[in-house]
Image (spheres, rainbow, N blue to C red):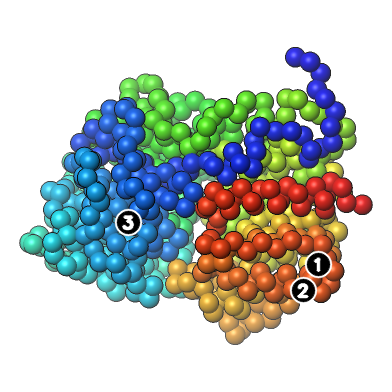
Amino acid sequence: MTDKQQKPYGLWDSPITALSVSQGVRLNEVQWDANGEFLVWLEGRSDIGMLVASQLGEAGVDLNGEMSCRGGVGYGGGEFTVQNNLVIFAGKDGRLYRRELTPEKAKAITPAYGSVAAPKISPDGRHVIYVFSDGANDVLGVVDTSGVQWPQKLVQGADFYMQPVWHPHGKMIAWVEWDHPHMPWDGTRLKLASLDVDELPSIKIIQTVAGDDETVIFQPEFSPDGQWLSYISSAGEWDALVLVNLNTMEKQVVYQPADLHLMEPAWVQGVRTYAWNTDSQSIYLLQNQFGSNSLWLLNIFSKEINKIDTGVYTSLEQISVSSKGEIALIAACASIPARIIVRDGNSWRVAARSSAENIPPAYLSSPQAISWLSKDGVEVHGLYYPPSNPIFQAEGLPPAIVYIHGGPTTQVMAGFSATTAFFTSRGYGWLDVNYRGSTGYGHSYKKMLNGRWGDVDVEDAVGGAMALVEQGLANEKQLVILGGSAGGYTVLNSLIRHPGVFKAGVCNYGVSNLFMLDMDTHKFEAHYTASMIGQLPAAAEKYHAWSPVYHAHNIRDALAVFQGAEDKVVLPNQSEVIVEKLRRQGVPFIYQLYEGEGHGFRKNETLLDYYQRVERFLIENVLFAP
């Protein structure tokens, strides 16, 4: 190969264009039909959620036309279920729809009222249980799969429900529930109910199996033979897989690893990290060790556990096992966009791809785990992606983007990110900061943000930037901080409290007023700020000190602000008040309000405009700025 051409960092030509990034297809969910004949998955195509079905490896067929499939409870998820050639899915309009896996149109089986998610078809195919919310009250509902009868409330009384599941004989169900002021990663309860099954099922007896306000219960599942009820529980610093013998109701911990997690924070409905094998003697587990996933098979009797080779993939999600023993996963790594892969025997095949995979691997950067110490001696974690381009090189150290994830109770995994690739292929370094409060590094690490959101996250963001400089990975004078939602909040506070550390910031729908967030947010997060900062009015001083709106006059560095006009989580005025203060102070800024977008951008045209504007902003205010 010829020698690389010299060109300044940040200006390298790249085939990863704003257009190609904006046109990508997102893979959100995958499930096997109960008969093992069909594989059904959900693709995000611009702002449309499209269900696709494939039979025995044939080309996929779209199922829902122009009607968007989208779970509407909380932040979404739990969009569909499939059994015996019948798909039940949540529509964007709040209805449940049925669709046979044959040429026909989808038919509504619930009225257009409220929001629905997590449908599950009964073993006999007659009924559907699901999560319903009208915004104020949540219940488990039930309706017949034909939509002839009016839906009924099956379970009510808790503030929230998720992960309902049928017992194989159809006369029991299990689910997870919790109440304010807790979040589903703080404390939940596992419930088991026996049913009277008539025209519509009704509850006979409900019992609490496990969980409380300080124990997290995640993903109940019945074994295929109906003997066991399984679930994942928080257990000390890490997680445990627990089995309940349904004959005796005795519990046993069958697997409790150290230094890795078995569950994810349930920001959305329908998250799955394990699945029973068809023999009812073993379970497939997705294990998360410091941002990388691996697949394992556990024998529940011998406790023997073996790793299943998944090749280069480091991000594995939404496992599903067919009645024939085939495994389906959403899989990715830094060099491969998300795919749906299927394992039959000992080999894997690709069933669906999220976007065109024609980018030469040399343009894609691989992550390096780095860490640094906080002021009080805690090891903080991050993933660094160096610039990567086979054509160009530059002298000196590169500019770097310090990325702050949203949540804040989540983490950045070592998977494919089109955004990261867009910038690293142009000559930027990129640091994913899994600041204290992130998941994936033990429950103690996750709790370190409690009462300190607006303090600890800012310290770790600045600490990450300084770690890049100290380790010779970035140009100290060309650091950028970027984040959305909770990450945008950290962007604003970092610029306010540490002017000059970052040459510029990019804030996407960021929180600026904690009082407003506490008063105006949706039901799911109604008490989240109380745990992250403190209870009002006692914590009013911290709310004022950590709300960027009261201190925006201290921002001196260029700032790009992007906001969805229909955002119900962070209202547009939270961005507009920051922009007005920047304008008065003469700070370089750009502001873009996107019509038809909510909390997170979906439309192709929005994403195209966003990447183009951010690239121009960084060229003008970082690369060419004095």
Q: Which residue is mark 2?
A: 581
| 438 up-or-down from 177: above or below | above
Residue at 38% over, 46% down: 50
SS class, disc 1: loop
Q: Between residues 88 and 228, which one lies in front from this camera angle? A: 88
Q: Which residue is mark 3?
A: 90
Q: Between residues 209 and 527, which one lies in front from this camera angle? A: 527
- Rendered image quadrant of residue 453: bottom right
Label ID, residue 153: none
Amino acid carrying label 2: it is: Lys
Q: Is residue 259 visible?
A: yes
- Rendered image quadrant of residue 561: bottom right
For discs 3 and 1, the disc positioned in front in the rendered view? 3
Q: Quick one: which residue is furthest to the top in this view?
A: 1
> How far across and how far down the image is residue 87, in percent?
25, 47
Other residues around mark 3 within 10 Å, as few (<14) / some (14–19) / many (≥20): many
Residue at 46% over, 46% down: 45
Asked whether the residues under the numbered discs 2 and 1 touch, taking CB atoms below 8 Å apart as contact, a structural biologist would say: yes
SS class, disc 3: strand
Q: Between residues 3 and 547, which one lies in front from this camera angle? A: 3
Mark 2–mark 1 distance (CA, rounded to whole Å): 9 Å
Residue at 12% over, 48% down: 124
Q: Which residue is mark 1?
A: 555
Mark 3–mark 2 distance (CA, rounded to whole Å): 42 Å
- Rendered image quadrant of residue 451: bottom right
Q: Quick one: which residue is furthest to the bottom in this view?
A: 537
Other residues around mark 2 within 10 Å, as few (<14) / some (14–19) / many (≥20): some
Amino acid carrying label 1: it is: Ile
> How far across and how far down the image is residue 129, in percent?
23, 58
